[in-house]
Image (tube, rainbow, N blue to C red):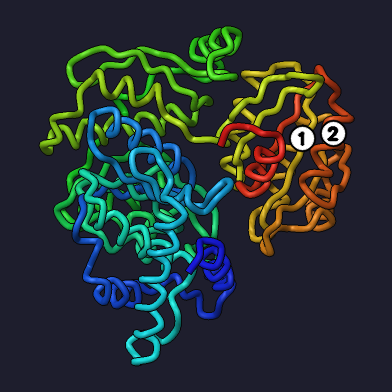
Amino acid sequence: MSYDSAVAQMYALGHELAQAPPHKFDLAHMRVLLAALGHPEKNFQSVLIAGTNGKGSTAATLASILQASGLKTGLYTSPHLDRINERIRIDGQPIEDDTFALLHDVVDRTAERLVSEGDLPWHPSFFEMLTAMAFEHFARVHPDIVVLEVGMGGRLDATNVVEPRVSVITDISLDHQKYLGNTIGDIAREKAGIIRSGGVVVALPQSPEANGAIGNTILGLGARAVSAVPYVPPVSPGSDQYLTAEKAESAEGRSGGPRSRYPLHTLGKEILVDTPLVGRHQLRNIALAVATAEELHEQGFEQITAESIERGIRDTRWPGRFQVLPAHDGEPEYVFDVAHNPAGAWALRSTLSAAYEDRAITMVFGVMRDKAIEEMAEILFPIARHVIVTHAENPRSATPDEIRQAAARVATDVEEAGDVASALKAARRIAGATGLVVVTGSIYIVGEAMRLLGARI
């Protein structure tokens, strides 16, 4: 089977949340599939990361630290910006096309046999298939450790069949309420489903509801909590201490965009955090990664040192998260940021306010129709002088008209564009060579825009 055929067959499965019942939410079926494959999930050590926002940034930072420590490191994330291969990586390199096609053939044939023999009621979902392929790949290439990002929820997510060395909970907010619950407490309980009896969980204080749900789960399972609080730099509301460092680095032109820098004490030494992940919300994600790295060091991964933590943070690559493409050749400056829910929208708004104070913003926005479109529009649209709404090449993507209707109460000037290319053309015309264009919303919108503009992915 060719790579293109494998990818086409994967996408033909459709999005699991559109199925009835939602096939993704049954770990018994995932375990049947993995048992038939010889339990690849038992053949590597892992860290499992769940949360509403920040789990990808935390995973990418931690994986970079582990790689900088000389550990052969696997990374599994979702969704992807450009190509599906990005989701499965070894030492930062995406899985090769031929390997992807081979693994798809192995897992698909196994799944078809299980369905035909009555061991599975239906073919595994897109995410179950991809997760099984990732596990099979990791089992074959023998990484020292694998960082796994939960797809959605936690308790019943397909990734939650591993026995992680450490579980990590990032910030929790309202998202996917139809499947995870209508309150922060309900959602936090689902996320806390990745905590193991007697296991270790790294977390930070957040809302009282989330704290209560996570804390009760830890107590009920006799798990050990590791706080990442010591690794969050003290930045008071309204302070420009941390953000001045961002602006200074941006002026120096490092990595084509802003970076954040601050001292941090870890493993008995002071290091300089120098990261491309900017915004106050990223301080928390980096803290979680550092705390997890320290815990792994204590568990016997002695290759992890203060120096490798510093180097790993500096070398982290997590595209599409406040990534800047500087103005050039008559093109305006672009900021790409995946802000796919209200919490992400608030984080983007805060970072834009700090990094681009008083700059007129032209915004390109598109989002999946199952998201809180009205709330996101009310958060983001008022900071833009002009908004162009569009949709990605994805059946779940809201149409420009649906977004406009959801944003009817926002007074910002809104224009519709039939696709991302048209939206970028309109934004370029409106912003001019000296303007600022912010592309945000769905990861698929951001990915298409970055590809069209030649930004590094």
Amino acid beneath label 2: His
Count of all numbered marks drawn on residues in the image: 2
| On screen, residue 125 above or below 358 | below
Name the residue nearer the viewer: 17 or 320: 320
SS of the residue under disc 1 = strand
Q: Is residue 99 left or right of residue 388?
A: left
User: Percent position (x, y) of residue 118?
Assistant: 35, 92
Name the residue nearer the viewer: 425 or 94: 94
Q: Is residue 266 left or right of residue 87?
A: left
Q: CA distance from mark 1 to mark 2?
A: 6 Å
Residue position for label 1 = 363
What numbered label is drawn on residue 386? 2
User: Percent position (x, y) of residue 195?
Assistant: 26, 54
Q: Residue at x 25, y 33 (%)?
A: 293
Q: Are marks 1 and 2 in contact (CB under 8 Å)?
A: yes
Quarter of the figure with the C terminus: top right
Q: Residue at x 57, y 42 (%)?
A: 343
